[in-house]
Image (cartoon, rainbow, N blue to C red):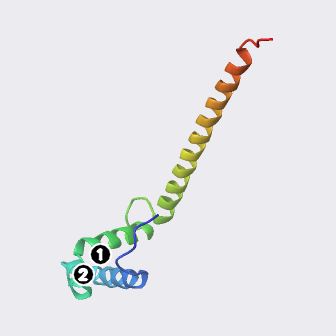
């Protein structure tokens, strides 16, 4: 279960949009993230991470997109479940094979 978010999606989108717009103008590029974060009452590194991820999702920067990251996490969970099921099946087959090899007493 994911931890609760400190900032809502609306604030995240607004802050990211403001920072990206300010960074496009060469006159306001320097310190744009710090200014926007200060105006909205959040830590600059939080906003910097959001902007970085927005750039990755938009194709401006190289990296793993949000959708790809979610898909990777889903596939990793599926692999863990399949490995667990495989282990259970191997253990069960070894148990039943041992039972068949035991001599029966009459």
Q: Residue at x 47, y 63 (%)?
A: 1
Compare marks 2 and 1 and give the one earlier in the sequence: 2
Horizontal side of 101 relative to 39 (left or right) equals right
Q: Quadrant of residue 34?
A: bottom left
Measured Cα–Cα span from mark 2 to mark 1: 6 Å
Disc 1 crowd rating (10 Å Cα; few below 14, some 14-19, many 20+) is many
Disc ID at residue 37: 2
- Location of residue 88 in the rendering, given as x and y in whole percent from the top left corner: 61, 36
Horizontal side of 92 relative to 83 (left or right) equals right
Is the residue 103 above or below the residue 65 in the image? above
- Location of residue 80 in the rendering, given as x and y in whole percent from the top left corner: 54, 45
- Location of residue 13 in the rendering, given as x and y in whole percent from the top left corner: 40, 81
Towards the viewer: 77 or 37: 77
At mark 1, the secondary structure is helix
Quadrant where the C terminus sits is top right
Q: Residue at x 30, y 81 (%)?
A: 19
Is the residue 88 above or below the residue 27 in the image? above
Pick out the residue farthest to the front: 106
Q: Residue at x 61, y 30 (%)?
A: 91
Towards the viewer: 82 or 20: 82
Q: Which residue is mark 1?
A: 47
At mark 2, the secondary structure is helix
Disc 2 crowd rating (10 Å Cα; few below 14, some 14-19, many 20+) is many
- Location of residue 11 in the rendering, given as x and y in whole percent from the top left corner: 37, 84
Is the residue 101 above or below the residue 26 in the image? above
User: Is residue 105 in view from this perspective?
Assistant: yes
Q: Are marks 2 and 1 in contact (CB under 8 Å)?
A: yes
Is the residue 68 above or below the residue 80 in the image? below
């Amino acid at each position: 279960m994911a931890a609760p978010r400190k900032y809502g999606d609306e604030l995240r989108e607004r802050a990211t949009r403001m920072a990206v717009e300010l960074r496009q103008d060469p006159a306001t590029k320097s310190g744009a993230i710090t200014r926007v974060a200060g105006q909205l009452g959040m830590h600059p590194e939080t906003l910097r991470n959001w902007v970085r991820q927005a750039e990755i999702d938009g194709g401006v920067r190289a990296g793993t997109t949000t959708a790809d990251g979610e898909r990777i996490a889903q596939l990793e969970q599926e692999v863990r479940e399949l490995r667990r099921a495989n282990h259970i099946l191997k253990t069960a087959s070894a148990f039943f094979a041992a039972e068949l090899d035991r001599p029966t007493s009459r």
